Amino acid sequence: MAKGDLLIIGGNEDKSDKKMILSRFAALCKNRPGPIGILTTASGFPEEVGSEYHELFHTLHGTKPLLFHLDSREKAEDPELPEQLSTLSGLFMTGGDQLRLTSILGGTTFYKHLFQEWKDNLTIGGTSAGAAVMSRLMIISSKLFEKEDVSVLEMGSGFGFLEDVIIDQHFSQRDRFSRLMRAIALNPQIIGIGIDENTAIWVHNDGVQFEVIGEYNVSIFDGKTSTYVDVAENKGNMTISDIRFHTLGAGAVFNLHKRELIIS
Amino acid sequence: MAKGDLLIIGGNEDKSDKKMILSRFAALCKNRPGPIGILTTASGFPEEVGSEYHELFHTLHGTKPLLFHLDSREKAEDPELPEQLSTLSGLFMTGGDQLRLTSILGGTTFYKHLFQEWKDNLTIGGTSAGAAVMSRLMIISSKLFEKEDVSVLEMGSGFGFLEDVIIDQHFSQRDRFSRLMRAIALNPQIIGIGIDENTAIWVHNDGVQFEVIGEYNVSIFDGKTSTYVDVAENKGNMTISDIRFHTLGAGAVFNLHKRELIIS
């Protein structure tokens, strides 16, 4: 069976007007029967955030969503979770802090069964922190120590729905260009994907390709072609030569295996 | 005779602490005898800006600078200007509005003789607007019309000290990534050079290469390799594939003809 599609959203998706991205998620969840699950683990305000998405997906998908307020590793071991996950058509991960997602859920019953269901065609969506967590390697945060003139990029393990990729979100809006470049400099074999707000990539075809959806752009940094990387001193400035770069607007389709734009 | 060196500064260069970039400019001006000229045409506050640089270069270069407060085309036709320009070792262009530089000085006696002196080894420096104006093609401004979802990039002719290059300044600090990408999409034959604040490129060796100086990074977008460009609808979002990208830290040397990093 094919793996589930992924809808990876750069944060701040429209929830009150055309709801283009959230509607797409609801439509993608028609691949399997059942309601949409909403995972609020990333959020510090799970009740508020959960009820907002609950209302949205209730309307957009026509079924009553299931809320997963898992704020401890203990709750993520609940023996009823596997059965609940198996009834879902899709799971949506809210924004917040991606480190909460991995530290609370990593290796738990919930995570293991989520991964298994995804391999059996469960659609997974995530916004902001819920987007960052999609890849095997994940950006946790970047910190600039002004006095020491040192910037440190914290990375960790994400949920691993995508290999050889690192996701950054709120990309243009929070000026994360140099942070993603740094991640690529440190891991030149991977592709950096910077997703703007109210913009998403729909990963389909068993993870081989994605299409850009939404208002702004997706920026791709392919480090595989780089000929020179100097980040040894871990300072704010660095030198990296020959990165392959693409900027993609709505409708553009990219092949993640060949690492190239598909021109239709 | 060799063309003069250029020191192209991304704006907001340190004027009170180590003054690394302005010291370098003063040192480069030792190529020829004579004082440094300060051109305030870009600025709306020529007296204040001029006297600040006057004091700085007086100290750093050891000669008394000449101020050029040329705020009209008439003043730029002053027949004494050619003689004054010939006595200079360098000319420094302040920040402000690059359109003032080109609209007031373009085609005047001042500009023609400045260009000639530069071809005879006059060093030229510029910060912010004074950096933008260095190339043949220059970014004037970019405007986003939110309601129409249209972004317009105004471009015009600069002073032409560099061909096949477009300069953007305050690059990381003002998040000008997409603006420079757009300029490249519209002119894929040129190289886009985004210079951060308190960072500069020192163009030497007859314009063949430059070295990065200062605190942050220089970003290079080479559109020549691009395989697909879609900016037809002039919207905020666009698709451009296969841009060659480099990010350069202090000390990195780049060959503008070969369009590649020189690895020492």
Image (cartoon, coloured by chain):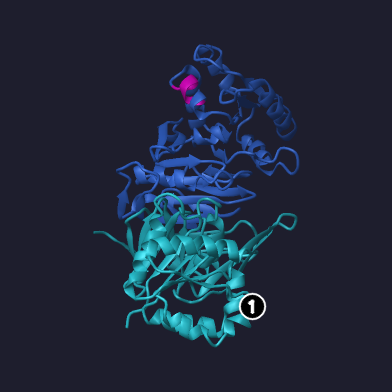
Chain colours: A cyan, B blue
Instruction: Indicate left or right for B162 with A233 as reference.
Output: left
Observer able to see residue B136: no
Q: Which chain carries label 1?
A: A
The residues colored magenta run B101-106
Q: In which quarter of the image is residue A206?
A: bottom left
**Which residue has dot 1 on it?**
A72
User: Front-most of B60 and B231?
Assistant: B231
The N terminus of chain A - image quarter: bottom left
The spot of residue A224 in percent (x, y) is 43, 68
B58 relative to B134 in the view: left or right: right
Magenta stretch contains residue B103: yes
Give the quarter of the figure containing the C terminus of chain A.
bottom left
Amino acid carrying label 1: it is Ser
- Residue A150 seen: yes
Q: Does the magenta stretch include residue B256?
A: no
What is the x, y in percent for residue B231? 33, 45
Determine the image quadrant of residue A211: bottom left
In percent of width and height, residue A7 lies at 41, 66
Side of A92 where B239 appears, left or right: left
In terms of secondary structure, what is the magenta stretch mainly?
A: helix
In the rendered view, tell whether residue A124 sits above or below residue A147.
below
Residue in view at x 34 percent, y 54 percent: B226
How many dots with numbers? 1
Q: Is mark 1 on a helix, strand or loop?
A: loop
Q: Which residue lies furthest to the bottom in this view?
A: A79
- Above or below: residue B116 compared with residue B191: above
The vertical placement of B138 against A208, above or below, is: above
